[in-house]
Image (spheres, helix red, strand yellow):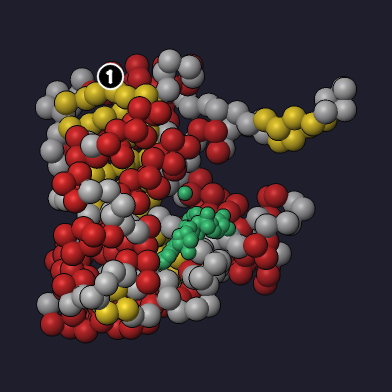
Amino acid sequence: MSKNILILPGDGIGPEIVAEAVKVLKLANEKFSLGLELVDGLVGGSAYDVHGTPLPEETMDKARAADAILLGAVGGPKWDNLEDRELRPEKGLLGLRSGLELFGNLRPAILYPQLADASSLKPEVVSGLDILIVRELTGGIYFGKPRGIRTLENGEREGYNTYVYSESEIKRIAHVAFQSAMKRNKKLCSVDKANVLEVTVLWREILEEVGKEYPEVELSHMYVDNAAMQLVRAPKQFDVMVTGNMFGDILSDAAAMLTGSIGMLPSASLDKDNKGMYEPCHGSAPDIAGQGIANPLATILSASMMLRYSLGEVAAADAIEVAVSKVLDKGLRTADIFSAGMTKVSTEEMGEAVVAALQEV
Ligand code: NAI
Ligand code: MG
């Protein structure tokens, strides 16, 4: 039976990096007889330019019909000043995440031994780093209502958002986190701000409650400010971390940099049945778009996660990871991970090197 994969390149470097990931996917498809059918769609600013909305109904229909989605990134200065905030490119992404109920965001931060010198931290602090941040993705302050900017009686303007999590929202992300911990080293750290925010008092309570169903997992709690500090001081103390949408957004970007480049980090966003959307952790990088220098590996590794988590094609997923590692062994580096003595390559050269390496795996 064929599997329907929706490809959403998006904006900025999105189309450049997705093109390379698609080459890798097509080869994996042939080599492992995966039966993938790739379908293209528009999202973000590029969808706005054509349809006047960042998430056209046509794209949403394709997304619902797909077995999995591979997305580049959305956004850019061209659309930053759109008066109607609902039409901003980012709304396309948020609409996909909430419309498909992709509440479970898995963001691994793995330091490749070949890139140990790309990290800003000392090798002894980060060598062998392999952590997983589980971020709640469809709730919290990014979605809470009411929200807006209003003018007070005294004429002063005020911006406001609402931070809210229901019990069931916390429960389902807690299960994703505990299940991930069970597949790894049975260590879970829940990050909150329970000393200040009532939402996270409830969060902590429910994590404890769900934890009773996973007695083998060692559960700890940490305030988010300390967690930020600990991630930089001694990141290897963590294995799986779970947190809400906004804290997870920030912490996972910090964790990303421990590994040297945001250009190396994939992500998965899953629904309750493991249908998912896969995308690099980084954005559309308008500062380097169109130059052919973006690192496509985060997107290629996202395609590998897609095969692993949504399609159950573990051998093909492993093969792509091995191919990436081989390319790094050869010393090929895009600008973001370049260091002295290595060979600097373009986006396309990096993609083609992974294809060549996968050919041989
Ligand atoms: P960004 O992640 O796009 O860029 C941050 C820095 O990392 C830039 O210097 C960029 O050149 C570099 N970078 C990012 N990806 C890279 C890659 N693959 N290879 C080499 N270097 C890379 O974040 P920024 O600048 O805050 O946002 C730019 C735009 O992207 C904004 O419009 C923002 O809203 C959007 N964005 C979209 C996301 C998404 O689609 N998931 C996530 C984050 C931001
Ligand atoms: Mg972010």
Q: Quadrant of the C terminus?
A: bottom left
At mark 1, the secondary structure is helix
Question: Is the residue 111 above or below the residue 211 in the image?
Answer: below
The answer to whether residue 60 of the structure is visible from this angle is no
Q: Is residue 132 left or right of residue 137?
A: left
Residue pictured at 67% horizontal, 30% vertical: 160
Residue occupying image coordinates x 48% and y 37%: 246
Q: How many marks?
A: 1
Q: Residue at x 22, y 25 (%)?
A: 219
Q: Is residue 48 left or right of residue 96?
A: right
On the picture, is 233 further left or further right than 76?
left
Which image quarter: residue 330?
bottom left
Residue 227 found in image quarter: top left
Front-lying residue, 129 or 218: 129
Q: Position of residue 141 (x, y in %)?
A: 54, 33
Q: Is mark 1 within 8 Å of ligand 2?
A: no
Which residue occupies the foreground of this view, 207 or 78?
Answer: 78
The percent position of residue 314, horizontal first and vertical second, equals 17, 62
As drawn, 287 above or below 221? below
Relative image position of residue 71 (x, y in whole percent): 44, 63
- As drawn, 284 above or below 353: above
Disc 1 residue type (three-letter)? Glu
Along the horizontal axis of the image, is 321 left or right of 351?
A: left
User: Which residue lies most toward the front here?
Assistant: 340
Residue at 15% over, 42% down: 184
> In which quadrant of the rendered image does the N terminus lie?
bottom left
Q: Nearer the viewer, residue 3 or 285?
A: 285
Q: On the image, numbered disc 1 is attached to which residue?
A: 208
- Image spot of residue 178 (x, y percent): 23, 33
Kindly tell me whether residue 229 is visible in this rendering: yes
Which image quarter: residue 352?
bottom left
Q: Residues within 10 Å of mark 1 (few under 14, many from 20)?
A: some
